[in-house]
Image (cartoon, rainbow, N blue to C red):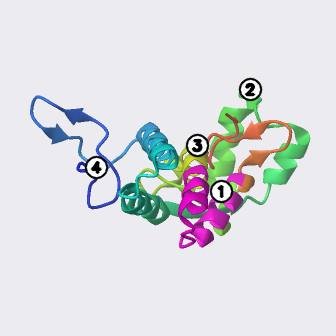
Amino acid sequence: MRTQLPSGLFPYDYDFATGAAEDMSDISGLNIVRRGGALFALVQYLEVRNNQCLCETVAKTLQAYADRSLPVGKGAVQSVLEDIGAYGRWQLSGILRSLLAAVGLLYTAKGKGALVSANGSYERAWPCATALALTSELVYRNLTGDDKFAHMRQRWLHGLLALRVPQRGFREAPHYLSES
């Protein structure tokens, strides 16, 4: 809790020899997912130990994820691609992805949904981080009764649903055709 940054996040790469943390200006996509895992671990600890000191820490981290969330909705041709089975076809994904992403047809940057982004770009808006934020918020809400993130809970859910490929899984990111 002492290492929590003013942003609400925790340093990820920390050099114990120098006491310095990684520059936070350009967080990689994987690091935002790993930080989501740390958030989930905190709410699990809160659940097991009922340590109320963690409530403010968790709330600050949830707010940081809310602040880093980008609006998202299903793209114009996304349902068609899902229906014809274009997702997961590696032969098509490179060509289609580049073309469709260039003209903005894989997702829309508006809608009811939101995805947590590592750096404010859709290229680093990963559903994994969003799912961890959503799950952590649900546990936090159930433990504390604090409903201040209800709006984000709905937006994160709709963001994940925007990237859901029926009977396959979730796309890796808004601009990818492959699913995780």
Label 2 to label 1: alpha-carbon separation: 20 Å
Indicate the amino acid at tag 4: Met
Does residue 15 show up? Answer: yes
Residue at numbered disc 2: 91
Q: Nearer the viewer, residue 47 or 147?
A: 47
Q: Residue furthest right?
A: 83
Identify the residue at horizontal 72%, vertical 27% (top origin). 90
Is the stretch drawn in magenta largely helix, strand or loop? helix
Indicate the amino acid at tag 1: Val
Indicate the amino acid at tag 3: Cys
Label 1 to label 3: alpha-carbon separation: 25 Å
Residue 87 position by quadrant: top right
Give the number of the disc on residue 24: 4
Residue 157 position by quadrant: bottom right
SS of the residue under disc 3: helix
- Mark 1 or mark 4, which has the lower sequence index? 4
SS of the residue under disc 1: loop
Residue at numbered disc 3: 128
- In the image, residue 99 sits, relative to residue 144, either above or below, namely above
Q: Residue furthest left?
A: 18
Label 2 to label 3: alpha-carbon separation: 25 Å
SS of the residue under disc 4: loop
Label 1 to label 4: alpha-carbon separation: 31 Å
- Mark 4 or mark 3, which has the lower sequence index? 4
> Which portion, as a residue range, is magenta?
135-160
Q: Is residue 140 magenta?
A: yes
Q: Is residue 28 magenta?
A: no
Give the number of the disc on residue 103: 1
Label 4 to label 2: alpha-carbon separation: 36 Å
- Mark 2 or mark 1, which has the lower sequence index? 2
